[in-house]
Image: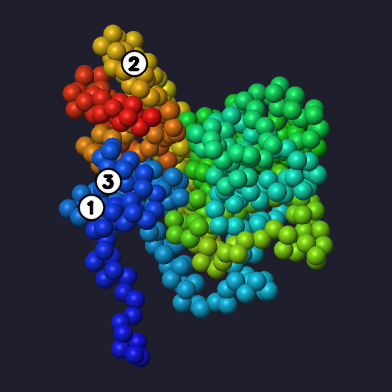
């Protein structure tokens, strides 16, 4: 009780009283299309708690998380080391965000991050992946004195205006013009890259070592060759490791799978947060930072109000400690290869399954046009309504029948993307492969429930146009 006899804020009581209104509250006050979409596909679940790679509902049923909050939950949910670090930093009552001092935690986290990429020298901390990209775009332009940044077709680098300008998906860009005058090039096309560089106005190329949309790997040798071209034309290589970094692909950074690749700027976020406090980081070379912050007059020329806050820094330090102590990167490599190879072995068994690709625990499962007449008719029906509906037909029974949460990799893509917590092991691989096999069996055997749901998706796609 407070001094005047009123009761203090009670979060547990508030959730107990109002938690049941979650979907109604969202529909009324937030993005009204989200609850509508979730109810349409039967994803309007109520999860009561979470730990590691699992959720539980009110009845005590467990759900395997193969999505990890779009990659944020790299260590799973509520890792005890990260939780303790946050309790400790709150209990310390630090003088945080004074803006006119140099607290130790940002320097310590920068030091640890840079140890994974020794060719880089300095770090800027923001609050998200799109902020990390915005920082890289600004720094590249200022350091080179050039206006244009190249990006790869189908890339995803964020949704703020700068990062949206290097987003390769029209669905995200439509209606938000005018954007910055940046230019797409096909992923892996060195000739197209060189043609743009010859114009002399390119500040850099931003690229995901593994594209999140569709899970496409850069071709072998592409990053190093692109780096050499860029440097020859006095432009920079920017690696967007927001999703692929911090161990996701079985190396700390995905660009490290290719020898000799040393990006000038690297963007990091998502898993560095431990799933608790938003954090983004832009790592770069010393000369770039010194050019941007060239004098005391420019000391705040690029900053973030909540950047380098103590909670985010403590979470990041704890994440890196766990990564090393528990062998998380090696586990992502080994478990990812086990999962990918077991799924790839099914390609010859199911004609609707066309490809399984990826690196570490970032895996894409692609579906395609079948050969048999009956399946081809159903496939054509779905494609005529909207591309991507078959992949959604697989995602839904994985959750509803097998209690496994996954996602379609992008709008109008027949690809499911798996980005589970990096802590999963063989039991989770077994559970997913068994469930996926059961769903594929039903699809190929003409299971009425699955294809009836497909017809409902077609109706929704047609009426939603």
- Say whether disc 2 or disc 3 marks the residue closer to the N-terminus: 3
Percent of width and height locating residue 200: 81, 32
Give me the C-alpha separation between circle 3 and circle 1. Answer: 12 Å
Kindly report which numbered mark, 3 or 1, lies closer to the viewer in this rendering: 3
Percent of width and height locating residue 453: 24, 29
In this orientation, does residue 260 appear? Answer: no
- Asked where in the image residue 313 lies, by quadrant, the reply is bottom right
- Of the 4 image quadrants, the one containing the C terminus is top left
Residue for badge 1: 57
- Which of the labelled discs sits on residue 44, or is there none? 3
Judging from the image, what secondary structure is the residue with disc 1 in? strand
Judging from the image, what secondary structure is the residue with disc 3 in? loop
Instruction: Please say if the residues under marks 1 and 2 sit with CB atoms less than 8 Å apart.
Output: no
Kindly report which numbered mark, 1 or 2, lies closer to the viewer in this rendering: 2
Q: Who's the residue at 36% across and 48% down the image?
A: 32
- Which of the labelled discs sits on residue 177, or is there none? none
Please state if 180 lies on the left or on the right of 295 as rendered: left
Furthest residue to the bottom? 3
Relative to 348, say whether 63 is above or below: below
Give me the C-alpha separation between circle 2 and circle 3. Answer: 29 Å
Residue for badge 2: 380
Q: Who's the residue at 19% across and 27% down the image?
A: 449
Please state if 76 lies on the left or on the right of 323 as rendered: left
- Asked where in the image residue 121 lies, by quadrant, the reply is bottom right
Percent of width and height locating residue 206: 65, 38
Q: Who's the residue at 20% across and 49% down the image?
A: 61
């Amino acid at each position: 009780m407070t001094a005047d006899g009123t009761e203090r804020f009670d979060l547990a009581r508030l959730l107990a009283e109002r938690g049941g209104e979650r979907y109604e509250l969202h529909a009324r006050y937030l993005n009204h299309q989200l609850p509508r979409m979730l109810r349409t596909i039967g994803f309007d679940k109520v999860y009561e708690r979470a730990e590691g790679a699992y959720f539980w509902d009110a009845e005590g049923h467990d759900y395997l998380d193969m999505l990890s909050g779009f990659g944020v939950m790299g260590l799973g949910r509520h890792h005890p080391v990260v939780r303790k670090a946050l309790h400790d930093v709150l209990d310390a009552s630090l003088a945080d965000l004074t803006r006119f001092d140099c607290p130790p935690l940002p320097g310590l986290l920068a030091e640890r991050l840079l140890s994974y990429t020794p060719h880089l020298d300095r770090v800027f901390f923001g609050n998200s992946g799109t902020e990390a990209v915005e920082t890289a775009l600004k720094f590249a332009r200022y350091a080179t004195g050039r206006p244009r940044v190249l990006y790869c077709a189908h890339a995803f680098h964020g949704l703020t205006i700068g990062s949206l300008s290097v987003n390769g998906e029209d669905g995200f860009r439509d209606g938000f013009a005018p954007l910055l005058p940046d230019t797409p090039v096909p992923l892996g096309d060195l000739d197209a890259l060189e043609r743009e560089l010859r114009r002399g106005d390119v500040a850099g190329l931003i690229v995901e070592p593994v594209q999140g949309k569709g899970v496409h790997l850069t071709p072998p040798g592409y990053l190093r060759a692109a780096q050499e071209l860029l440097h020859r034309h006095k432009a920079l290589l920017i690696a967007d490791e927001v999703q692929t970094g911090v161990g996701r692909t079985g190396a700390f950074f995905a660009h490290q799978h290719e020898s000799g690749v040393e990006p000038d700027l690297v963007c990091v976020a998502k898993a560095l947060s431990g799933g608790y406090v938003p954090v983004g980081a832009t790592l770069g070379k010393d000369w770039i930072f010194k050019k941007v912050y060239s004098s005391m007059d420019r000391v705040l020329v690029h900053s973030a109000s909540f950047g380098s806050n103590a909670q985010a820094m403590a979470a990041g330090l704890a994440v890196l400690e766990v990564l090393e102590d528990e062998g998380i990167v090696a586990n992502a490599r080994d478990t990812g290869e086990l999962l990918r190879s077991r799924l790839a072995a099914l390609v010859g068994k199911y004609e609707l399954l066309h490809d399984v690709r990826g690196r570490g625990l970032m895996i894409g499962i692609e579906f395609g046009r079948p050969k048999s007449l009956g399946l081809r008719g159903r496939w054509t029906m779905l494609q005529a309504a909207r591309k991507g509906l078959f992949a959604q037909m697989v995602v839904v029974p994985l959750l509803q029948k097998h209690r496994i949460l996954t996602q379609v990799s992008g709008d109008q893509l027949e690809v499911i993307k798996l980005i589970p917590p990096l802590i999963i092991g063989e039991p989770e691989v077994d559970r997913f492969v068994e469930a996926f096999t059961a769903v594929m069996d039903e699809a190929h055997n003409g299971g009425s429930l699955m294809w009836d749901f497909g017809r409902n998706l077609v109706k929704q796609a047609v009426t939603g146009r």
